[in-house]
Image (cartoon, rainbow, N blue to C red):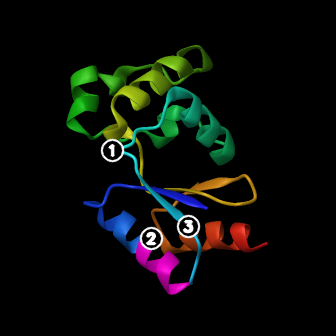
Amino acid sequence: MEIWINPACSKCRSAVRLLDEEGAEYTVRRYLEDPPSADELRQVLDRLGLEPWDITRTGEQVAKELGIGRWPKEPAERERWIAALAEHPRLIQRPLITADDGTAVVGRSDEAVREALARSAG
């Protein structure tokens, strides 16, 4: 299991704390320091079952500068969104947890983190 975090994010710290409390084995990826490639983002999106606009933090300053809020959310624009996330990792929703069963979750709640734990334990 791997968790993508921004250490400054309270939701990320909560997720890591819960993983530690549960004795989970996991790897931390500080995705702002070690940004994912476009290919890695495609893989995580497939595991999440989501589109790039579903995991984009549109309230970030860089999102406003890019005008992302006006970008079409349609298949023809998917690569444009992925390229923006790869170039500006701050736009990626966090924390992202990849479970051992090949799935992933956005771990913004204790329930979502427990779901990833259950998927990894099974």
* Quarter the N terminus occupies: bottom right
- Which residue lies at the image location 33% right of the left edge and 55% below the top edge? 6
**Image location (x, y in percent) of residue 73:** 51, 24
Q: Quick check: 13 above or below 76?
A: below
Left or right: residue 90 compared with residue 101 = left
**Image location (x, y in percent) of residue 98:** 61, 55
Q: Which mark is residue 26?
A: 3
Q: Quick check: 83 above or below 50?
A: above
Q: CA distance from mark 1 to mark 3?
A: 18 Å
Magenta highlight range: 16-22
* Quarter the C terminus occupies: bottom right
Residue 25 location, quadrant: bottom right
Confirm or deny contact between disc 1 and disc 3 (CB under 8 A): no
Q: Quick check: 67 above or below 61?
A: above
Q: Which mark is residue 15?
A: 2
Which residue is disc 1 drawn over? 32
The mark nearer the N terminus, 1 or 3, is 3
